[in-house]
Image: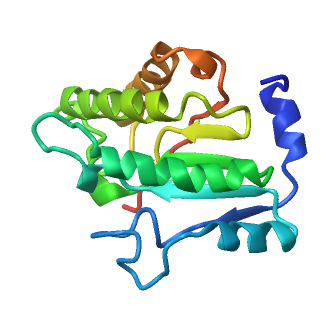
Amino acid sequence: MDNTAVQRTANIKLGWNIGNTMEAPGAETGWGNPLITEDYIKLVKRSGFNAIRIPCAWDQYSDKKTAKIQDAWLKRVKHVIRYCVENDMYVLLNIHWDGGWLENNITPAKQDSVNGKQKAFWEQIATAMRDFDEHLMFASANEPSTNDAAQMSVLLSYHQTFVNAVRSTGGRNSYRVLIVQGRRLSKS
């Protein structure tokens, strides 16, 4: 973890989005894509890419009462990240749309429950992935949408919960690069 966020960004030349897989409803192949393999990652690398974005769902793989993510899902995501890191690729892992539990609930009424889930998920994700080096970065959300200052305040609390949760897991997560996405303007 020798580089700053600015230096790391300069090292990223061309990124590939592994969409329609790890965030697909039902399973990784839910939208007709094959399972991600190391051969696939090697092909992306040979094609000139050195960064991979992994949009990922977590809610569908969690207990609705406890927010405990299934161990098998954490293991699978870790496996895919390992393919990338072992092939010297940077990885951006986020909580993607995932049924909209975050993006569709940026309201004061939902703030406590969403922050609770955000904290629970990121503590688990970060703990499972904390041994990866600087090639792995985390992003707190995906295209969060706000209409006004009150919603923006709620969104900022979701981002702060993410930062606090990741940092609390220690190890390399104490100084891992974290991405906090700005708001997407809602359509009125």
Q: Residue furthest bottom?
A: 32
Give residue 171's quadrant in the image: top right
> x and y percent of residue 118 in the render?
33, 33
Q: Which residue is drawn at 70% across and 65% down?
A: 16
Image quadrant occupied by the N terminus: top right
Image quarter (top left, top right, bottom left or bottom right) of the C terminus: bottom left
151 with respect to 35 (left or right): left
Asked whether, in this view, residue 99 is left or right of residue 128, the answer is: left
Q: Image height check: is 102 above or below 38?
A: above
Query: From the viewer's perspective, is 108 left or right of 173?
Result: left
Which residue is drawn at the image coordinates 57% and 35% (left, top)?
180
Does residue 100 appear to the left or right of 37 in the view shown?
left
Q: Which residue lies furthest to the left in this view?
A: 65
Residue closer to the observer: 123 or 144: 123
Residue at x 80%, y 50% (from the top left corner): 88
The quadrant where residue 2 appears: top right
List x then y, in percent, for residue 76: 44, 54
Q: Is residue 143 visible?
A: no
Question: Is residue 49 in view?
Answer: yes
The quadrant holding residue 181 is top right
Q: Which colour scheme is used?
A: rainbow
Where is residue 100 shown, x and y percent of the image? 30, 55
The front one of 54 and 133 is 133
Q: Residue at x 63, y 56 (%)?
A: 53
Residue 96 x, y percent position in the rendering = 43, 54
Could you tell me how many numbered marks the image carries?
0
